[in-house]
Image (cartoon, grey):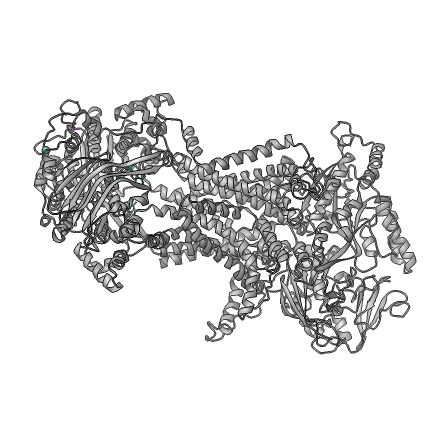
Amino acid sequence: MLDAPIARIENLRVEFETKAGTVVGVEDVSFEIASGETVCVVGESGSGKSVSSLSLMRLIEFGGGTIAGGKLVFDRKEGGEIDLAEAEQSLMRTIRGNEIGMIFQEPMTALNPVFTIGRQLTEGLKVHRGMSASEADARALELLREVRIPEPERRLKQYPHELSGGMRQRVVIAMALACKPRLLIADEPTTALDVTIQAEILALIDRLKRETGTAVMFITHDMAVVAQMADRVVVMFRGNKVEEGTVEEIFENPKHPYTQALLAAVPRLGEMTGTDYPKPMKLVGSNAAEPEPIIGSDETLLEVKGLTTRFPVKGGFFRQTVANVHAVEDLSFSIPKGRTLSLVGESGCGKSTAGRSILRLVEPMKGSVKLDGLDILGQSDRDLRKARADMQMIFQDPFASLNPQMKLADQVSEPMENFGMYSASERMDRVAALFDRVELPRSFMQRYPHELSGGQRQRIAIARALALNPKLIVADEAVSALDVSVQAQVVNLMMELQSELNLSYLFISHDMAVVERVSHDVGVMYLGRIVEIGPRRAVFENPQHPYTQALMKAVPIADPRKRKQEKDLNFKPIPSPIHPVGYEPVKNEYKEVGPGHRVLISDSGY
Amino acid sequence: MTEPATTDPQAIAALQDKGPLAPPRSQWLDIWDQLKRHKGAMIGGFFLIFITLAVLVGPYIWTLDPQKLDIRNKDLRPIYTAIWDSTAKTAWGHPFGTDNLGRDQLAQMLAGGRASMAVGWAAMLLSLLIGTAVGVAAGFFRRLDGPLMRLTDLFLSLPILPLLLVAVTLFRQPLRANFGPEGGMFVLIVTIIGITSWMPTARIVRGDILTLKEREFILAARSIGTTSWKTITRHLLPNVLSPIMVSATLGLATAIITESALSFLGVGFPSDFPTWGKMLADAVPRMVDFPERVILPGTAISLTVLAVNYLGDGLRDALDPRMRGR
Amino acid sequence: ERGADGQVNIIYWQAPSIMNPYLSGGTKDIEAASLVIEPLGRYDPTGALVPYLAEEIPTVENGGVAADLTSITWKIKEGMKWSDGSALTAADVVFTAEYCMSPEGGCAQRAKFDGVTSVEALDDLTVKVTFGQPTPNPYGPFMGGQSPIIQKAQFENCVGAAASSCTDQNFYPIGTGPFVVTDFRPNDVISLEANQNYRDPAKPAFATVNFKGGGDATASGRAVLETGEYDYAWNLQLAPDVLAQMAAAGKGEPIAAFGTLVERIEMNLTNPSPDLPEGERSTVAAPHPFLSEEPVRRALSMAIDRELLVEVGYGQAGRATCNLVPAPALYASDNTDCLTQDIEGAKALLEGAGWTDTDGDGIRDKDGVKLSLLYQTSTNAVRQDFQALIKQWWSEIGVETELRNIDASVFFGGDPGSPDTFQKFYADVEMYANNFDGTDPQSYLSMYRCGNEPKPSSQWQGENINRFCSEEYDALLDELARTGELEKRGEIAKKLNDILTKETMTIVPLVDRGRVSARAMTLGGVQLNTWDSELWNAADWYRIKE
Amino acid sequence: MLTFTIRRLVLAVPTLLFISFAIFMLLQLAPGDPMAQVPLTVPPEVKQQMREALGLGQPPLVQYWKWLVQVLWIEPKILIDWLTQDSWLLGWLPDTNLYQNELRVISWQTRSPVMDIVIQRIPQTLWVVALAYVVGVLIAIPIGVYSAYRQYSVFDQAGTFVTMIGFSIPPFFTGPLLIVIFSVQLGWLPSIYDTTHVVNDWASFKIQLQQMIMPVMVLALQTTAQISRYMRASMLDNLNMDYVRTARAKGMSEAVVVTVHVLRNSMIPVITVIALGVPSIFGGAIITENVFKVNGIGQLLITALFANDLPMVMTLTFIFAFLIVAFNLIADILYGVLDPRIRYD
Ligand SMILES: Nc1ncnc2c1ncn2[C@@H]1O[C@H](COP(=O)(O)OP(=O)(O)OP(=O)(O)O)[C@@H](O)[C@H]1O
Ligand SMILES: Nc1ncnc2c1ncn2[C@@H]1O[C@H](COP(=O)(O)OP(=O)(O)OP(=O)(O)O)[C@@H](O)[C@H]1O
Ligand SMILES: [Mg+2]
Ligand SMILES: [Mg+2]
Ligand code: NI
C-alpha cells in the first residue's frame, strides 16, 4: 500500500431486475485502490468484475442494475471523500471521464463508428476542461502521441473502422486518459487482442501509471496478464471477493481453493520444456490418473502442398478483380494420424483461411490437399460433401457458431441427419452418447445455446464435430474465447479424445501457452506463409526465424517474477497482404535446421 | 508452479460449469410461458381469438342474413343509443341497428369481418411467402441478387388498379367457374394485394440474410455438410423470423386497408358482399347522422390491427430463445 | 352591371379536361365549354328551342327549314363579337362544320352532323345546312352545348389530324359566351373572367369564375350545402337522405329537373353462357334459355317496386317510370302499368309458364333450367343499392340472382377485347341509364333496329343491346323517319316505346332520373336545364344581396 | 463511391427500359377504352373515329416505341431549351433550339402534352404531399427516439397505440371526419383545396396554411406511424451498444449521448427507409388528394386511369419507376455517406 486509498469499495451489492426475477450481479465485495497502484481483479466470466467497475462509475444503472447496498467511497481531488453510491447523476457526470477514466473490453465496439477519432477524443475535454476546439485538438494530438499511435495527425481525422484493433484500443486508452483521471479502470483491455499488441498495451498502461501516478483498477481473467501488471490482486468468484493479496502472495501461496484451481488451470509457457509429446493438464480436484503423453502415429493423414488462397478485390466500373488479398501463400505441411499440428501467428496472417481452405469452405487457388489419400481439391461438389464427413471444424466463437434458434440435440444430430446416417432413434442415442463423451449432462439436450456457458457451448461444438467420426478436426481458435479454467477443461477433453479416437487436429491459435500444451508440431505463420515449422519442442526451445523469436518474447508468462520489460518489445506492423492482379510472390524456400524443423529463408515480408 | 496441497471438493465445484438448473421443458410450453408474460400480446391474442370466433361462429348464432333487406326497418340506430336519446329508432331485433336499406348491422359486421379477416390473413400470408422467398433467394444466392432486386423495383412501380383490372379480365371467368363469384373475386383480390405488397418484406429479409450469411454458424452448417436448402430452412429462416413478424403485422393491416381502399374505389368484391372496409366506405357520407356505422367497422379494423401488432410483438419475443427466460 | 358581383365558385366533381366539346364527349367538358363558346341556338329548361347567336330558330313555318326537310338556313344575329373583338361571321359557322366533319380529327360530335351533305355561307350572316335526305329534326348541327361555334381564325390550323396538338386552342378557345378562360388546368381548375365583348353590356354579373373539378359528389355537395365555400355544385348523385341532411345546414339548396334519362334494366335475349363458344355467346345465334320467354321478363318487371327504388336512390330527383321515352310530353307514352309491385302476380305468371320449384331449393326451374340470373351494372353506390333491392324481390318470386358490378370505365369503355362491356352483355340482365340528345327520340328508338345489335362481326359495336328483333318495330321505325308531322310522329314514337317496354318487356324502365344540382342561397338566376348545358344561362347568374 | 454511383446509374437504364416495357404491356392488356367518358348517345362509328385519331389503331410495339422516343428524346430536348431560354438558373447559356415541333407525349384526355400537366401538378404535390411527408418524419423521429429511450414507459405504450391506430384507419375515413369537424361544424378550415392560390404575403400564406393543414395531417398520420416504428427499433438496437457506455463514461450528459451519439447511428437505417418512401409521395396519396381535392399527381394518375388515358398513365408510372430506381440509388449512397464504415467501390 503506497498511499491513502483513492477509492474504496465497501460491501458492494448490485442487483438486476429481470423478467425472471432479481439477479444478483455482485453479492459482497470490498477492496480499495491507492494511487500509483495497480489492483488486478480476476475471476471467471460472470463473476462480477465488470459489474463492480461499472458500479464505481455509476454506469450500472443504465444497464438495468441497482446498487442495493454498500459504499463506493471516492476521494476527490479537492472536496474530500464522497460516496459515489449516493451521488447525483449530474455530479457523476463531472466525475466520469474527468476523475475516473474507463477503458472497455471491446475495442471494436467501444468507439462510435460514425464520428472521427478526433471528435470522440476532444468531446470529453471540451465538457470537463472547457477547452476550445483548437486547444482540445492540440491536447488530443498530444494524447495520441502519448499512447504511441503512429501518424497521430492523420488518425484524428479517421474513423474507428479505419484503424486496426490495437490502434483502436490505444484510442480508447487515450480517451480514458484525456482528463488525467486519478483512477483508471481498465476492463479487460487486451482480451480481444493479439499477443504482440497485448504486450504493447500492457507496457503502455504500466508506463502511464508509473509516470502519472494514476491508480489503476485492472480487470482481467488472464493470469499471465495479472502476473505482468498487478501490484495487488483481488480474486472474485460468483459475485464475491474470495481472496486478496499482493501479486506474489496470490501466485505463490493461494489460500482459497478457487484461486488454487484457477492457477492450476493456467497453461504457462515453458511448462512443457523438455518433453516431446503433449500431455493433458492436471487439474485441481480431478481424480483422474496422472495424464499420459499422447504419442500418435507416424502415418500421414493430411498432406498439404503449395496451398495458396487469394481473395479477389473487386473494383472499377465492371467490378473486375483489381487486386488480390494474398491470404495464404504456398503452404505445405502434413499431419500424421493421431497428432496435432498448431498454426500460430498474429491476427490476419491467414490461419483461419488456411484451415478453411483445407475443408474447401473457401476455394483455394492452387495447391493440393490430400486427406487419407483422397484429393480434396479435386472433388466435385457432391463428393466434397461426402469427404467433409472425414474432416470437421470447431470455430472460435462458441456463441456465433451455434444456431441460436435450434435445440442442442438437433444441432449435434444435424450432421448425421445430413448424411442420412442412422435412424432417428439411433441418432438420438448417439447424440446422448456424444453428450456423455464431452461430459455434458443429457438433460442439456433439450436446451438452447444461450442457456449454456461458453465452455459448455464449445463442448457442443466439439460434440457436433465428432458426430460424424471424423479423422481430422480443424480447431480454429477453439479455446481462445474461454475462461482459463474452462479452457483447461476443453483442452484436456480434446486431448483425451485424440488419444482415444486417434484424431488428428489442425489447431489454430495465437495463444502460445496453449499451443505448447497441445501440439506435436507447430507452424508459425506470417503474412500468409509458414516462416517456421517443426516439432513443437524444436520450435519453442530453439526458434530460428526472427519473427518466431519476437513472438516468443511477447508472450506474457504467468509468473510475477518473470515480467517483461517494455524495451524487449519490437514489433513492426504487418504489411498489407493486398497486391495488384499481376503480382507473383516469391516461392517459399526452407532450410532444414533439425529433423523436420524447417525455417523460411526466402523473403517473408518480416 | 505451485501444486495445490489439498484437493478441496469446493474447488471442483468452482470449476464446474454452472448450467441452468430448471428442468428442460417443451419448446411450445416455453414460448407459451414467455407469451403469457407479455400483457399486450395476451390482450391482443384474446381479442384476435374473440374476433375470429365471432366471425366464424357468430353467423350461426346470429342467423339473420346480412344481405337481407328489411326496408321498413331501415336506418335503425343501435340499441345503446336509446340510453341518451329516447327518441332514437331502435329495435332489439337489430342490436347494432340497420343501414339505409335495412340490412342488419350486426350480421353485416360478422359477415364483413369474415371477409376482411380472410382477405387480410390470406393476402398477408401470400405476400410474406413471396417476400420471404424472394428475399432469401436474393440474399443467399449471390447470382440471383441483382435480377431479383430489379424485379422488386418493377413490382414497386406497378400500379395496383390497372393490375387489378387486367387480372379481372383475364382470370375472372376461370376463377368464377372454380370458386364461385365471391370466391373467385376473393382469390383475385388476395392475389393482387399479395403480389403488390411483398416488396418491403423481400428487402428486409434480404438484408438480414446477407448479414446472417456472414455468421459463423452458417459456415459451420456448411462444414457439416448441410445442403443449401437445409441451411436456408433450418438455419436462416428461423433467424429472420423477427423481421418477418414485423412485416406480417404491418402486412395484415395493409391488406385489410388496401381491400377497403379498393372497395372505396369501386373495384372489389360484389356490391352485396360486405367487408369491414366496404361498410366503412359506404357509411362515410352518413357519418354525421349515423356515426355508429363508421365507428363499428372502423373500430373493428383498428382493434384487429392493434391486436395483431401486439401479438406480433409478443410472439417475436417469445419465439426468440435468447429473449425467453430473461 | 357587368362584373359587379365578384366571383362565382362552381364545383364539378368530375374535372373538365378540355374546353373543346368537339374533342371530348364528356358532359363535364361540354358544360365547362358552354361558359365560353355558344351554339346558334339552345334548348331551354322546357326543351323549347331558343335562339342564341341566331336571329331566330328556323322552322318550316318561318321558312328557315325547307319544306322537303332537306335543308335548314340559319341567320346570325348582327353585331355578334368574339371575345377578341373580331366579328362572328358565317365563315366561322361553316368552319365549325368543316372542323367536325374532317374524318381524321376524331370529332366527338360527329353524329350531330350525320346526314349533312354541305354547309355553305350564303352571305356574311347566313348559313345553309343541306342534308342528303329529308330530316324531320334538322337541329343537329349548331344547336345545344354539344355543337357550339368555334372561331375560324383560331382553329384554322387545327383541322383533321392536327386537332389534338392544338393545346392552346383547346384550352383557351375564343368564344362569344359570357366568360373567357384565363387559366386552364386540366382535370383541376379553370379560372375565367367576364368577356368584355359580350353582347349584353350588363352581363355577366360576375367578374370571375372559379371552376373547380375533382373529388366526389358528397364533397362537392358539402361544399355548397354545408360549408358554403362554393356557389354551385353539379350533378349531386347522392342518396336522398344524405342530400337532405346536407341541405338542412341551410347554406344552399338542391335543385332538380327532369329530362329523358331513364335508368333501366336491359334483358339479354341471347344466351350469355360461358359454355358457348366465343362468337356465339351473347349473339342472336343462341337465344336465351329463359329470358326469351316473355312471361319471365314480365314477371321480373312485376316484382320490382319502382317507387321504393326512387325513394331509396333518388328522392326528388327521380320518378318511377315504365317508359323508355319519358319526355317530352309529345313523345311520352302514358303507360303506367308497371308502377305497382305485384309479387303474387309475378309468381302466378311464372307458375303458369311452367316455372316451378321442383327441387325445393327456392329457385324455380323448368326442364332442368334454373331461373338463375347474372345481373351486372357499373360501379356506383345507388346502382348497387338497386341491385341489392331487386335481387331481394327476385328471390321472393323464386329467381336467383348473382350481382356483378364493373368499373364504369370498363363497362362503358366499349373495348371489344374486354368481356365486361355493356355491349358484349355477357350477363343475363344489366342496368344502366341512357337518354337522347335534344328533344327528338327518333335516333334513340332506332337503336333497337334488327341487326343493329353488337356482334363479333361489328367488333361488338352496335346499340341494340338486348338483341331485340321485330319486323313490326322496324317497319314503324321506317314510317317515323318519313313522317314530318309532329302529332303523327308522337303517336308512332309512343307505339315504339310500348313495343319495347309494355308489350315485350325487353327493356324494363325503372326510374326517370332527374338531375340534381345545388346552388348557394346567395346565387340567383339559376335555371336548371336538362336539355342543354346546366350552365346555359350563366350570363344571367347574379349574387343575391342580403 | 463515384464508380459505384456511375455503375448503378448505367445499370439503371436497362432496368428502367425493362420496367417501362413491362408496364406498357400490362396497360395494353388492361381493359378499358379512352372513349368510356363519351356518352352512350355518341354512335360507335364516331367513337371508332375518335380512337383512330388518338393513334390507337397502331400495333402496341409501335406505340411503345413512339412513346419511348417521345419521353426519352423529345421531352429532354424541351427541357434543355427551357433551361437555356427561360430559367434563371441556366439562362445565361446560349439559347438552344433543339425542339422542332415534333409530336410530344399527348394525353388522350386533354390533348395536351403530358409533361406540361405534370409540371402544373408539382406545386400541389410538393405543398401538400411532400410537406406531409416531412411533417410526418419530423413528428415520427422524436416519438421514436423517446419511446425507445423510455422503452415500455407510458409514453412508449401510448405512442405505439396512437401510431398503430393512425396506421389502421384509412384516409377515406379520417379525411371526411376532419372535414365534418373543422369545416362543417367549426367552419375553421376550407374543405376544398384551392390550387390556384398564390402565396405572396403573410395573409395569403396563412390561407395556404389553413387549406393545407387537414390533408397534411391526414397524410402525415400514416407516415408517422411507420417511421416512428422504425426509429424506435433502430434506437433500441443502438442504445445497447458499447459506444454508448463509452460516451457515458466520458461524462457526457444524457442529452448528448442520446441526441448525438445514438441518434446519428440510429438514423442510418431510418434515413434509407425515409428515402425509399419518397417515391410514394408522387403516387401514394390518391385517396387523400381526392378527398380534399388537392389535385396533385396522385389525382392525376387516378383520373387518367379511370379515363384510360394510356400515355398519361404510362408516363406517370414511368416517372414513378424512375423515382423508385433513383431513390434506391440515393438511399444506397446516403447509406455510404452517413455510415463511414460502408464504402462502395
Ligand atoms: N444488464 C444485466 N442484466 C442482468 N444481469 C446482468 C447484467 N449485467 C450483468 N449481469 C449479471 O451479473 C453477473 C456479473 O456479470 P459481469 O459482467 O460483472 O461479469 P464479468 O466478471 O465481467 O464477466 P466477463 O469476464 O465475461 O466480462 C453475471 O452473472 C451477469 O449475468
Ligand atoms: N472472405 C474474405 N474476403 C476477402 N479477404 C479475406 C476474407 N477472409 C479473410 N480475408 C483476408 O485474408 C487475410 C487472412 O485472414 P484470416 O482470417 O485467415 O486471418 P487469421 O490469421 O485467421 O486472423 P485472426 O487471428 O484474426 O482470426 C486477412 O488479411 C483477411 O483480411
Ligand atoms: Mg466483463
Ligand atoms: Mg481467424
Ligand atoms: Ni507453479
Magenta segment main secondary structure? loop
Quarter holding residue A378 = top left
Q: Quadrant of the C terminus of chain B?
A: top left
Instruction: Give the x, y percent position of residue B70.
Output: 73, 39
Q: Give B77 or D319, whichever is nearer the viewer.
A: B77
Please determine whether, in this image, residue C453 is positioned above or below residue C16: above
Please determine whether, in this image, residue A218 is positioned above or below residue A409: below
Whether residue B138 appears in this view of the structure is: no
Q: Quadrant of the N terminus of chain B?
A: top left
Q: Give A121 or C443, whichever is nearer the viewer.
A: A121
Whether residue A256 appears in this view of the structure is: yes
The magenta segment: A291-300
Does residue A316 appear to the left or right of B304 in the view shown? left
Instruction: Give the x, y percent position of residue C279.
Output: 71, 43
Instruction: Give the x, y percent position of residue B295.
Output: 60, 44
Instruction: Give the x, y percent position of residue D195.
Output: 59, 64
The image shows a total of numbered marks equal to 0
The picture quadrant for ligand 2 comes to: top left
Does residue A165 appear to the left or right of D84 in the view shown? left
Please determine whether, in this image, residue D190 is positioned above or below residue C450: below
Q: Is residue A294 magenta?
A: yes
Q: Is residue A31 magenta?
A: no
Q: Give D264 or B223, whichever is nearer the viewer.
A: D264
Quarter holding residue A106 = top left
Does residue A74 appear to the left or right of B289 in the view shown? left
Q: Residue at x 34, y 38 (%)?
A: A17
